[in-house]
Amino acid sequence: MALLRSLACFLFLLCSSFTFEAVNGRMYGGGDVVEEEEDDSSTVADGARGGAGGWPGYLYTRAVGRCTPQFWSSGAEQWPNIIPQEAAVSKVFGSRSIDRYGPRLTVLEATTRTDDNGSSSAFAKLVKQGSAALLNAYARKGFPLDSWEVKALLLEALVSEDAAAAQADRFEQANESCI
């Protein structure tokens, strides 16, 4: 049965590596591009957006490390029991975080935030990377910070936007270098 599955996967990959485009008469995937004479009146759509005259569509994914906020929010691994996904950031990090993040923001929502890019988002990046760092401190042996350090550093960084941006960058570096 395993041999049959392996053979089926191989055939699927082999067949899917060749993509033919009937509109322009081009063949992609085999190495050479074969072209027929084209009519100048035809328009070619952008294939990346699914147009008829573009190139084959490939699924691009970003590699996600085992310690990043994206990894923790993906559900690929069970969270440490000490921090449930639905726990409020204010309960996990302390009452000083209520002023900045409110009483209802959960740790899961903090790791899934997408507003952490830009000049005015230092506090959003801080809670996103800090939440991941806290999860890593509990779940990963050898993580450079202890849980109490992560909590204290996050609370200390709430004093200004510059402090928040600097600490968020440190958390991000620790999260991305974790194995």
Image: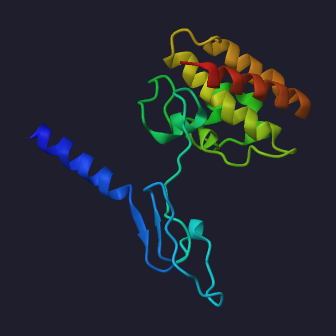
Tally of numbered tags = 0
Looking at the image, which residue is at 44% across and 57% down?
Answer: 29
Quadrant into which the N terminus falls: top left
Name the image quarter holding residue 119: top right
Instruction: Please indicate whether residue 95 sits to the left or right of residue 37 in the image.
Output: right
Looking at the image, which residue is at 49% across and 32% down?
Answer: 84
Vertical side of 21 occupied by 41: above or below: below
Q: Nearer the viewer, residue 6 or 156?
A: 6
Q: Nearer the viewer, residue 80 or 52?
A: 52
Task: For residue 160, say whether it is visible.
Answer: no
Q: Position of residue 141 (x, y in %)?
A: 51, 10
Name the image quarter holding residue 122: top right
Give the residue at the far bottom of this rendering. Answer: 41
Q: How is the image coloured?
A: rainbow
Instruction: Please indicate whether residue 115 sits to the left or right of residue 17 in the image.
Output: right
Q: Nearer the viewer, residue 10 or 112?
A: 10
Instruction: Please indicate whether residue 44 sits to the left or right of residue 79 in the image.
Output: right
Looking at the image, which residue is at 50% across and 62% down?
Answer: 57
Instruction: Please indicate whether residue 18 sits to the left or right of residue 140 in the image.
Output: left
Q: Position of residue 76 (x, y in %)?
A: 42, 36
Q: Position of residue 107 (x, y in %)?
A: 59, 36
Looking at the image, which residue is at 67% across and 26% down?
Answer: 93
